[in-house]
Amino acid sequence: MPHPTLPYDVEAVRNDFPILHQEHHPGTPLIYLDNAASSQKPRQVIEAMNEYYRTTHSNVHRGIHKLSESATLAYEGARKKIRSFINASNWREVIFTRGTTESINLVAQTWGRANLGPGDVVVSSVMEHHANIVPWQILAAERGFSIEYIPVTSDGQLDLEVYERLLTQRSVKLVSVVHCSNVLGTVNPIADMARQAHQHGALFLADGAQSVPHMPVDVQALDVDFFVFSGHKMAGPTGIGILYAKRAILESMPPYQGGGDMIAQVTLQGSTWNELPYKFEAGTPSIAEAIGLGAAVDYLGQLGMTTIHRHEQSIIQYALERLSEIPGITVYGPDACRKGAVAAFTLERIHAHDVAQLLDADGIAVRAGHHCAMPLHQHLGVTASARASFYLYSTPSEVDKLAEALYKTRRAFAL
Ligand code: PMP
C-alpha cells in the first residue's frame, strides 16, 4: 500500500525528540505508539527546563530579588503563551494545575460542591476517562445529585438524541464530556453540545486531554465554560496541566486548596482570597513544568496545529487501512475522518496484554488494558483492548511495522 504524502518533513521533526533515536531492546529501534498515555518531549522543552534550573530558579510571586522576578516572569510568560494557544480571552482564566485529573477534581470540589444538590443532574457519557466520572461520583455521594450518561452508538459516537432528551427532561446543571475519546478517538461536537447545554441553563465542561495536543482549540469559539488538559500529552512535562474557565464563573467559585499565594489577607479569625488565577494556585507551583509547557506550546505553534492535525489524519487513515487487513481484528470507534489518531483494537482469541507484550518484543510500545475507561469497555463487551496512538512524529513506516508485528503475533498463536 503506498504511503500517504505528509504535510511536513517528519524526519526533521523526529530529530528534535532524543528518545526516539534510542534502541528499545539491543538492536531493536523504539517505535513509540503510546502517545495517548503520554507523548515524548522535544529537546526544546527539555532544554527550556534545564536552562530554567541552571540560571533562573527561585520561588515565584514572593521575593523581591532579581532571581525571583525572573522566575515569576518566566512562569507568567508561560501562562500567557497558553492563553494565546487556546484563545482564552484573558490570562486570568488560565489556571495551572497538575493535569486534567486535578482540573476536573478542582471544578467538582469548588463549583460542584457550591452548586449541586438533591434533584440536580450532571450529564456525562459512557466514553469518558475515569477522571471525568469518578470525581462526580464522589461528589454525588456527598451532595445527593444524580449523574446521567449519554450512551455510545454502534459506530462509536455519542447518542445526541438521548443527550437532547436528557437536557429537556431533567434538571441538568452541568454537562461534562470528553472532546476526543482516548479509546475510540471520536471527536465529539463540543461546540454544538455546549450551545444546547446553555439553552437549557446548564454549564459545559470539555475534557480536552486528547484534543489540545492534536488539533487547533479555541475555547471562545467552542464557548465552553470549563476546559481542561494535561501538559504531558502535548510534548510538555508531567505534573502540569490547565483549567480554563470563564472569568465570571471562576470569580464566583470558592477556592480549592488553602495555603500560600491564594490569599489576600489572613488573620486568625479568617482569610480573604487573592485575585484570579492565584486564588486557585495554593502553594509553590510547578514552576519549571509550567515553563516547559510554555516551550511545548511554542514548539507546537511553530509546526502549526492545523498542520499537525493534517499529519495525524494521514497517519490514522493509513493505520486504519493497514489494520483492517489483519484477520480477526476489531478496531473500535468511527472512521478516520471522524476521529483522532487513536486505534484501539482486539485480536480474536489473543488477549490484549499478550498482543502488547509481543509487540514490545519488536520494539513497539502500545498500551493494553481498559485505558481508564472501564464503562466504555463494558459497553464494547471486552475487558481490555490494545491501543496504538500516534503523534506529530509518527510515520507510515511505523504503521507498517505495527501491521507486520501483528501478523507475527497471530503466527505466534498459531492463527
Ligand atoms: N481524560 C482523558 C480523555 C485522558 O486521555 C486522560 C489521560 N489518559 C485523562 C483525562 C487524565 O489525564 P491525566 O492523567 O494527565 O490527569
Image (cartoon, grey):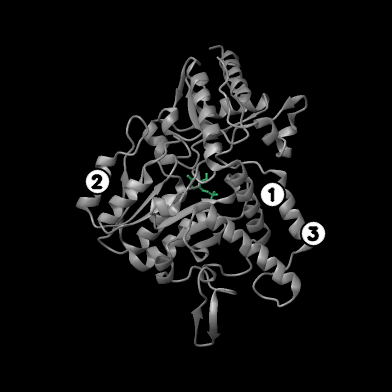
Looking at marks 2 and 3 on the same chain, the residue that comes earlier in the sequence is marked by: 3
Residue furthest to the left in view is: 169
Horizontal relation, residue 186 to residue 173: left or right = right
Q: Position of residue 1 (x, y in %)?
A: 55, 14
Front one among 290 and 105: 290
Residue that carries the numbered disc 3 in the rendered image:
54
Q: Position of residue 217 (x, y in %)?
A: 47, 47
Residue type at mark 3 is Arg
Residue 284: which quarter of the image?
Answer: bottom right
| Residue 354 in view of the camera | yes
Q: Nearer the viewer, mark 2 or mark 1?
A: 1
Q: Secondary structure at mark 1?
A: helix
Q: Secondary structure at mark 3?
A: helix
Few, some or many C-alpha atoms within 10 Å of disc 3 (few <14, some 14-19, many ≥20)?
Answer: few
**Separation of marks 1 and 3 at Cα, in angstroms:** 14 Å
Which residue appears at 37% of the width and 33% of the height? 156
**Separation of marks 2 and 3 at Cα, in angstroms:** 54 Å
Residue furthest to the right in view is: 54
Residue type at mark 2 is Glu
Say whether mark 3 is within 8 Å of ligand 1. no
Few, some or many C-alpha atoms within 10 Å of disc 1 (few <14, some 14-19, many ≥20)?
Answer: many
Looking at marks 1 and 3 on the same chain, the residue that comes earlier in the sequence is marked by: 1
Few, some or many C-alpha atoms within 10 Å of disc 2 (few <14, some 14-19, many ≥20)?
Answer: some
Horizontal relation, residue 215 to residue 394: left or right = left
Residue type at mark 1 is Val
Q: Position of residue 148 (x, y in %)?
A: 30, 49
Residue that carries the numbered disc 2 in the rendered image:
164
Which residue appears at 79% of the width and 62% of the height? 55
Which residue appears at 71% of the width and 71% of the height? 68
Disc number at residue 45?
1
